[in-house]
Amino acid sequence: MQTQSGQRQITEGVIWKQLLIFFFPILMGTFFQQMYNTVDTIIVGRVVGTTALAAVGATGPLVNMVNGFFIGISSGATVILSQYYGAGNRQGVKDALHTGVALSLVLGAMITVLGIGLGPWVMGLMNMPENCLADAAVYLRIYFAGALGAMVYNMGASILRAMGDSRRPMLFLMATCVLNVVLDILFVAVLKMGVAGAALATTVSQFISAVLPILVLMKQPEDQLELKRLRIDPKLLGRILRIGVPAGLQFVTFDFSNILIQSGVNSFGDVVMAAWTAHGKTDSITWMITGAFGVSVTTFVGQNFGAQKYRRIRQSVWVCLAMSVALVGAVAALILTFRTQILGIYTDDPEVIAVGSFIMLSIVPFNVVFMPIEVFGGTMRGVGYSVVPTVITGSCVCLFRILWLATVVRRWHTLRTLTLCYPISWMIAAAVFYIVYLRGNWLRTRIAQCGMEPET
């Protein structure tokens, strides 16, 4: 665990180097976390078939919405802890650590119960074809049985990153991802357990991944996690929720709109559903990159805000935006160039490959437009200014997509009109974020609210 020297690496030094040092372990960790579901998808698609591939893929938006909300809550704990860490407040770090882990246990248990009970019912509301519904319900029940493991891992990993340690969460996910692949092959390809085997492999791996960061936090020399001290501090909980709930709702707005879009995709049948799934799993590489930059800039800004280095905060925004646009653009170009070969990894059905190629050509070229949303929003959350990014995302993305589906797609029921809502909503949200960032007083407002030295 990095201590004060690790802190100085974030609050001092060349900005782009420090962002990249922090970014790459987060990216790799996100990659291996995403591989859980991607491996499930590939093995199910190749071994079980197109219908099973469509069923597992259709659960993605609901799973992402639930996980996204909790990741947002975790970001509240991360911001508070990183600010304490940047300011050198050791007692504050310890209190935030124990409150965060305790909160993850409570919310993880709640999500397990709600997911098992309501998940299959929600899938029934999403225009799911009858031949896919049973498999989707089985996958969700088993997946949510392991939700507690996922919640605890995400909180533990977020806390480690807030302290400057982004390497070990990555290593943990690498190990458990390998385990997930082995279990997928065993349960699905060897034991022929179908989608239930894929979900079981993920559940077992998630529980093991939860144990590893907790053990590290319990054994570190400073700011040690003590199980007997686990409790939720009401004052800290209030601060965490004031930041985390809006951040969680921002994830939810994206994923809720994706659930509605998935309902529209389902209306086109299992071939389009399978193609959409293959595209989504491929394009998840892009969202790993955007998410890693978002986490990096949020933690970077949080520590520098605690250290009252406001100029460094503003400089980091443009550095992070330039790097993220360049990298996302390069990945988009690779995906488009090799789209047919990539889609062939998931299925050998030529119709699915043709439809998947069309979907990629309609969406992937516009992925770079999303980066201002991630970077500007992450920066504002890093100083604790969390409500405005949620309002922008909710109105410009979720509300717009609902209206688009209810009007344009209903009038012209084609796959092309459905895919258009992605780039258009990104453009609107990015423009609003740009204006708010440049003309808003978000940083001065937070400085005044925290009683800190004013920006010069």
Image (tube, helix red, strand yellow):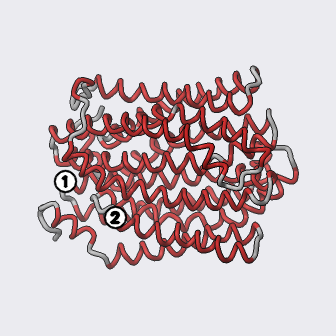
Which residue is depicted at the point 59% across and 62% down?
Answer: 329
Up the image or down, 26 lies above or below 207; here it is: below
Q: Which mark is in front, 1 or 2?
A: 2
Q: Quadrant of the C terminus?
A: bottom left
Q: Is residue 321 visible?
A: yes
- State which quadrant residue 228 falls in: top left
* Residue at left offset 16%, top offset 44%: 88
Vertical position of residue 255 compared to residue 53: above or below: below
**Residue type, numbered disc 2:** Val
Residue 121 position in % (x across, y down): 62, 46
Q: Which image quadrant: the N terminus?
A: top left
- Which residue is label 2 attached to? 387
Q: Is residue 134 above or below residue 244?
A: above
Say which mark, if any, is on residue 415: none
- Mark 1 sits on what residue? 307
Give the quadrant of residue 127.
bottom right
Indicate the position of residue 245 as horizontal and vertical percent values: 36, 54
The foreground one among 307 and 416 is 416
329 lies left or right of 14:
right
Q: Answer few, some or many: residues within 10 Å of disc 1's Cα (few below 14, many 20 plus, some between 14 and 19).
A: some
In front: 16, or 265?
265
Query: The residue tagged with tag 2: helix, strand or loop?
Result: helix
Q: Reply above or below: 336 against 73.
A: below
